[in-house]
Image: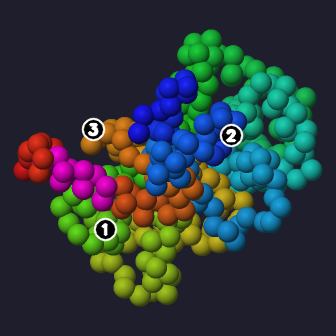
Amino acid sequence: MLKPESSPLECFGLSWNKDDAMCQTCPYVAKCQENMGFRVERIAIGEAKFALVPEAFVRRHEEPEADRRDIEAIYCECYRQVFGVERTVGNIGGLCERLFKMAATAGVDLRTYVLINMFGYQQAYPEKAFTPGLLVDGRALYRVKVYADVCIEHFGTLNSTLLDVVTGGDLSEFDLAKRMLASEVKAGEWIVEYKLWHQGLPFQPMFDDLEPELDPGWLAVETHYEPILRQYSIREDQPTCKERLGSRHDAVMVYKRLKKRKHEAIAYFRARERIMPDAVKTILSRYGYDGNDFEVENKPFTDPLQFWNRLATAIQHLECLLFVNYHEGIYAQS
């Protein structure tokens, strides 16, 4: 249905988002929703949200602002990235407010502030352990300024990869989000490819084929892989392939550690959450689509592999239509 002549909005009847400020005050909202029909509660797949932290890790009435809520997890993740070890020294605790004020003074987000401070200290004192108090000491702001200014001057932006370029370090080697993204793209693309030519759930076949190539941390937080981890833990159904056995052993070690350390576990889940939009964009582009070509329900996804399975089915159906109607697409090439 065409938009009313009195409406100047190009989005009328095409898109509606309950969280969008414009939609909340729009005088045409009722008619817009009526015109959208069943699509009214759907959004473009490129806007999909993910909520992967298990409910058991989230306390009621926790601080809703992500950085404040996850400050200990951020500390754990940055510590791992800089020092290459899982066990941190100390925790943020009562330093929270001072830390946020200093990050604001430095003009960077909390994660960047913590990362640069740890990295700068490690460069200056490689034999000394880093403690949380160093994030708010007299030289903390100076450490951030030195490295941030160099990155921005030369590259116009700031991230861990550019810190490597500037300093000759290897921060990206232990970048949890980078490792998560690599494994997510491998798994998601495998599932899409599988579903184009096969029926049934793809999860176990994917693990059978990709297990040694997937990061142990990614495997440790993947719900559909958990039964395999439990079987390994009680020494049942052991793989005979040495490469697969080593990968599974590493995943089990991470899994057991995360069960004991809440904040470290949250860091892993949050890292996977953050990379999911990039993984979606990457996989869609590999099949010639973008973030506006499919729609999903306007609610967070909690199961990434099921998300890939549903996306794969949608791509399969669309490719079937392209073949039947126009003799084009993937099936026309086979």
Q: Main secondary structure of the magenta part?
A: helix
Tag in front: 3 or 2: 2
> Is tag 1's residue or tag 2's residue first in the polypeptide sequence?
2
Distance, label 1 to label 2, CA atoms, is 40 Å
- The mark found on residue 24 in the picture is 2
Task: From this view, report whether residue 312 is shown above or below residue 97.
Answer: below
Residue 130 within the segment the image draws in magenta: no
Task: From this view, report whether residue 182 is shown above or below residue 135.
Answer: below
Does residue 172 appear left or right of residue 133 in this picture?
left
Residue at 41% over, 88% down:
236
Does residue 95 appear left or right of residue 267 in this picture?
right
Quadrant of the image occupied by residue 202: bottom left
Distance, label 3 to label 2, CA atoms, is 34 Å
Count neighbours of disc 3 (C-alpha within 10 A) and say few if under 14, some if 14 to 19, many if 20 or more. Answer: few
Residue bearing the label numbered 1: 202
Residue at 42% over, 34% down:
2
Count neighbours of disc 1 (C-alpha within 10 A) and say few if under 14, some if 14 to 19, many if 20 or more. Answer: some
Residue type (three-letter) at the residue carrying disc 2: Gln
